[in-house]
Image: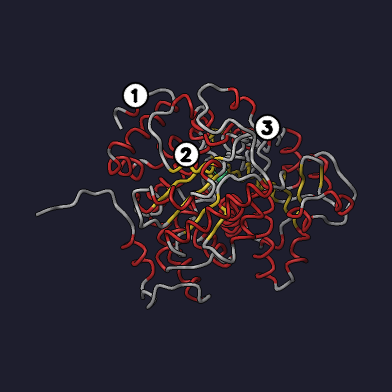
């Protein structure tokens, strides 16, 4: 830590950490676990975003497994080259929508590598059981295509049948070589592929989309926790989203499911409390013909509205959620409109990295006279407001996927079910204390994350057993203890 702290530039810290991961993996995890709040922003958002943008020019040693379009027909052989066979989790991207930064082609590898290091540090999955994969089908990023240091295929993205066949070959090969209980986490695919892949492989593989489902589960947890202290139920809230992609519609749907469960109304009815704005304005029924499939459930009957601030004034949301991937879109008038409507406006700026956040913590507090309950996808430092220290929470799927993954692995689950996501949300929300909330936090601190992950894992596993989706029999009696006993720790073995 002494050496690391000498670096002033976050990207240099990132490079030093990646070197350490290569040369002394155990020490890397020891540092990451013991200094999680300090190092998460280094190996994960926001710095990992910058690392992906500059991946070619900071490249030292390859990490993870690249599968390129040129290897079509030979993917099984490529996978066999990976030195480990007991793989339990794969995080795979095609780099088309890296965080809120857009198409970074195969430089997106930083994301699967970073996510899997959290699987180990936060969720206790053995490092050797983790496989980061980037599928290189080209890039439409003109700057990268011209960049002399770009490490991927210099061609525009393959699409349609060619893309589908490659992905299908990959999915089949993974199952053939690693078995049906390997968890495949889809990460940072573009919308058009993300929803299709999840639907297509959700019934044949153990798959999970972190951007759609992980983000949804963490946001739901934050809202359950907030309502525990401010009172009221989810069904009492009105939700407005800016951004109707994976995170936006994913959160909206999980919220509708939970409201439907709590109030015994059909999910179609519950969806009516939730409104989404995309780049063309409020999603309403008159736009039906031109809407992408995943937006259609949110096309309610209403006059068109173009501007977010007008949508806030008309819809009167109690909760405003940013999932647009575009920074500085929660402007002063938007936050002021939320604060005029609500004593405690809940404002979540979820886009990553920090540069894409819809507003900063300071802006949310300043423009709401310190009243906003604020959380963001990437971390913000505490803010002094009129003599009070306000601590923004980090609403990031990193709270959920490591524990969820551990729960799936330890129960030998063969499918991911929405009820497991709900169980994970409730487990996380239950860890938020009055003391956390009084500081402004709707999530527990990351310092306790391994304990929290064990709890999430236990509740997810319990749900897997209840649903008949678990294959590890008999069911362990104490699932929390069992989860803890499964977790990798970076300690040296005693040979005495
Ligand atoms: O990686 C993160 O910090 C959260 C995430 O999945 C995304 O922004 O795509
Ligand atoms: Mg993501």
Residue on which disc 1 sits: 6
The residue at label 2 has a CB less than 8 Å from ligand 1: yes
Point out the image quarter for the C terminus. bottom left
Residue sitting at 39 percent across and 76 percent down? Answer: 473
Which color scheme is applied? secondary structure
Residue sitting at 63 percent across and 30 percent down? Answer: 141
Residue sitting at 31 percent across and 63 percent down? Answer: 485
Q: Residue furthest left?
A: 496
Q: Choose between 305 and 333: the one closer to the eye.
A: 305
Residue on which disc 3 sits: 328
Crowding at mark 2 (Cα within 10 Å: few <14, some 14-19, many 20+): many
In which quadrant of this rendering is ligand 1 seen?
top right
Crowding at mark 1 (Cα within 10 Å: few <14, some 14-19, many 20+): few
Q: Choose between 108 and 26: the one closer to the eye.
A: 108
Residue sitting at 56 percent across and 62 percent down? Answer: 421
For label 1, the SS is: helix
Point out the image quarter for the N terminus. top left
**Left or right of residue 272: residue 180:** left
For label 2, the SS is: loop
Rendered image: mark on residue 44: 2
Q: In the rendered structure, which disc, 2 or 3, sits on the residue that comes first in sequence?
A: 2
For residue 250, say whether it is visible: yes
Q: Residue 280: image x %, image y %?
A: 81, 41
């Amino acid at each position: 830590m002494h050496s690391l702290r000498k670096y002033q530039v976050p990207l240099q810290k990132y490079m030093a950490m990646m070197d350490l991961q290569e040369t002394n993996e155990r020490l890397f995890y020891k540092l990451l676990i013991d200094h999680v709040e300090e190092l998460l922003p280094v190996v994960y958002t926001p710095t990992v975003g910058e690392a992906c943008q500059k991946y070619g020019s900071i490249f030292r040693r390859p990490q993870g497994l690249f599968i390129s379009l040129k290897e079509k027909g030979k993917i099984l052989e490529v996978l066999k080259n990976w030195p480990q066979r007991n793989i339990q989790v794969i995080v795979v991207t095609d780099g088309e929508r890296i965080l809120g930064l857009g198409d970074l082609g195969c430089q997106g590898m930083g994301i699967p590598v970073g996510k899997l290091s959290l699987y180990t540090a936060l969720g206790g999955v053995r490092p050797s059981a983790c496989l980061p994969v980037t599928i290189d089908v080209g890039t439409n990023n003109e700057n990268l295509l011209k960049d002399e240091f770009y490490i991927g295929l210099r061609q525009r993205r393959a699409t349609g049948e060619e893309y589908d066949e490659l992905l299908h070959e990959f999915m089949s090969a993974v199952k053939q070589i690693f078995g049906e209980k390997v968890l495949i986490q889809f990460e940072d695919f573009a919308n058009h592929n993300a929803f299709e892949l999840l639907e297509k492989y959700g019934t044949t593989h153990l798959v999970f989309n972190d951007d759609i489902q992980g983000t949804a589960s963490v946001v739901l947890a934050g809202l359950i926790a907030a309502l525990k202290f401010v009172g009221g139920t989810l069904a009492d809230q009105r939700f407005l989203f800016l951004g109707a992609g994976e995170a936006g519609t994913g959160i909206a749907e999980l919220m509708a499911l939970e409201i439907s469960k709590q109030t015994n109304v059909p999910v179609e009815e519950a969806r009516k409390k939730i409104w989404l704005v995309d780049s063309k304005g409020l999603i309403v029924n008159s736009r039906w013909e031109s809407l992408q499939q995943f937006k259609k459930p949110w096309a309610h009957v209403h006059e068109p509205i173009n501007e977010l601030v007008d949508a806030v004034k008309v819809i009167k949301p109690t909760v405003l959620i940013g999932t647009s991937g575009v920074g500085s879109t929660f402007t002063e008038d938007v936050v002021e409109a939320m604060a005029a409507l609500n004593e405690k406006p809940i404002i979540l700026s979820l886009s990553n990295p920090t540069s894409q956040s819809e507003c900063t913590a300071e802006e949310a507090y300043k423009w709401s006279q310190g009243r906003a309950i604020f959380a963001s996808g990437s971390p913000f430092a505490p803010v002094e407001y009129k003599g009070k220290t306000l601590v923004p929470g980090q609403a990031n799927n990193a709270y959920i996927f490591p524990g969820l993954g551990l729960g799936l692995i330890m129960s030998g689950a063969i499918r991911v079910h929405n009820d497991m996501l709900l169980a994970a949300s409730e487990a996380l929300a239950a860890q938020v204390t009055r003391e956390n909330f009084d500081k402004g936090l709707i999530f527990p601190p990351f310092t306790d994350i391994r304990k929290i992950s064990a709890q999430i894992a236990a509740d997810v596993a319990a749900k897997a057993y209840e649903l008949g989706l678990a294959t590890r029999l008999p069911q362990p009696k104490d699932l929390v203890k069992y989860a803890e006993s499964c977790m990798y720790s970076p300690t040296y073995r005693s040979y005495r």
